[in-house]
Image (cartoon, grey):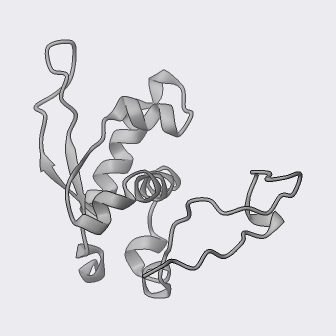
Amino acid sequence: MSRKYTQFLPTQTLKQVNNRKVCNEQHVRVSRSMLYSEAFLRLNPVALKLYLILRIKYHKEEEQNTDFPFSKSLGVKVLKLSKNSEKSVRRGLLELEKKGFIERTVFSKGGGKSNKFPNRFKFSTKWKQYQ
């Protein structure tokens, strides 16, 4: 089964291919039911960005229904925040957990120099039952 690739419009991408602003690159699919769900509409901006980045970065793990590693420091780096913004990333991850978009599968019991293992998460469908 082959995939059909649809070109992005110039307003949808920054990449240029052969001096054209139209190209194929990774994207996130958000269904209408998710987009209009109470859980999605009430996400704070950091949590929303984190969720979209997680979906892009770990799309293979999502398809295989496996867990993936993610740390606060990686979140700060990916979101291009200051190094003092780990609390924002932690709050965003907690909100995604609370509203049922992700679930933590492995808790690393803190961080620091002695513990080099990040928490592991898995995408979840519990957002459908969020009230």
Question: Measuring 33% from the left and 40% from the top, which residue is drawn there?
Answer: 90
- Above-or-below relation of 19 to 69: below
Question: What's the residue at 57%, 34% (across, down)?
Answer: 80
Q: Residue furthest bottom?
A: 33
Residue at the farthest right position: 19
Q: Residue at x 48, y 79 (%)?
A: 2
Quarter of the image where one finds residue 112: top left
Tell me the quarter of the picture where residue 38 sits: bottom left
Residue 74 point in image, percent of width and height: 40, 33
Q: Nearer the viewer, residue 42 or 29?
A: 29
User: For this view, does 70 lie left or right of residue 75?
Assistant: left
Q: Is residue 83 above or below residue 20?
A: above
Query: Is residue 101 at least partly visible in the picture?
Result: no
Query: For this view, does 110 lie left or right of residue 39?
Result: left
Instruction: Specify the quadrant of the image occupied by residue 21.
Output: bottom right
Image quarter in which the N terminus is found: bottom left
